Image (tube, grey):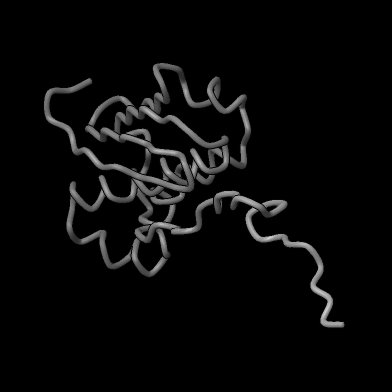
């Protein structure tokens, strides 16, 4: 990884992604593995990852992106990485902020799994109430 980089943190559900963005040869590394290997070659997940670049009409091959992600499933990990990449691009150039905000790529999705409550069948499900 290059000595000068832009760092950002992205989260979604229980997934946390630490993203480093630097100018370079255009590699996207997730947990020390190429992105095609980590996400099993899924074209949809890759397109979601590079969405900030496509919206800004930037070639992602101009940047070296290194990501450490943990928690959650693949879909929430991709959303966390996408948010981290968007935040890192704003760190790189403040002019990108308006475009990414309009595309709703800078907002964190706050929905998390609700915990199970004691005495209930799940997070909310209760026994049926009878009035009479």
List the single residue furthest toward the top: 32
Question: Which corner quadrant holds the N terminus?
Answer: top left
Please tell me which residue lies in front, 128 or 1.
128
Give x and y (percent) for residue 83. 38, 49
Give x and y (percent) for residue 47. 54, 43
List the single residue furthest toward the right: 132
- Work out whether 108 lies above or below 38: below
Please tell me which residue lies in front, 26 or 83.
83
Residue at 42 percent across and 64 percent down: it is: 104
Question: Which corner quadrant holds the C terminus?
Answer: bottom right
Taking 130 as reference, is 5 left or right? left
- Work out whether 58 lies above or below 124: above
Figure quadrant of residue 65: top left
Figure quadrant of residue 128: bottom right
- Work out whether 38 lies above or below 98: above
Please tell me which residue lies in front, 79 or 24.
79
Please tell me which residue lies in front, 46 or 71.
71
Residue at 37 percent across and 39 percent down: it is: 60
Taking 102 as reference, is 116 left or right? right
Give x and y (percent) for residue 12. 45, 48
List the single residue furthest toward the left: 4
Residue at 66 percent across and 52 percent down: it is: 119
Residue at 60 percent across and 50 percent down: it is: 118
Count how many numbered circles sit on residues in the image: 0
């Amino acid at each position: 990884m290059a000595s000068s980089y832009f760092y950002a943190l992205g989260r979604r559900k229980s997934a946390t992604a630490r993203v480093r963005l630097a100018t370079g040869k255009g590699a996207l590394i997730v947990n020390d593995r190429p992105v095609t290997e980590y996400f099993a070659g899924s074209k949809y997940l890759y397109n979601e990852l590079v969405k900030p670049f496509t919206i800004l009409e930037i070639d992602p091959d101009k940047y070296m992106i290194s990501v450490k992600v943990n928690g959650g499933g693949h879909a929430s990990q991709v959303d966390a990485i996408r948010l981290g990449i968007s935040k890192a691009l704003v760190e790189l150039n403040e002019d990108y902020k308006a475009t990414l905000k309009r595309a709703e790529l800078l907002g964190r999705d706050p929905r998390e799994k609700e915990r199970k409550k004691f005495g209930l069948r799940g997070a909310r499900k209760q026994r049926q109430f009878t009035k009479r």
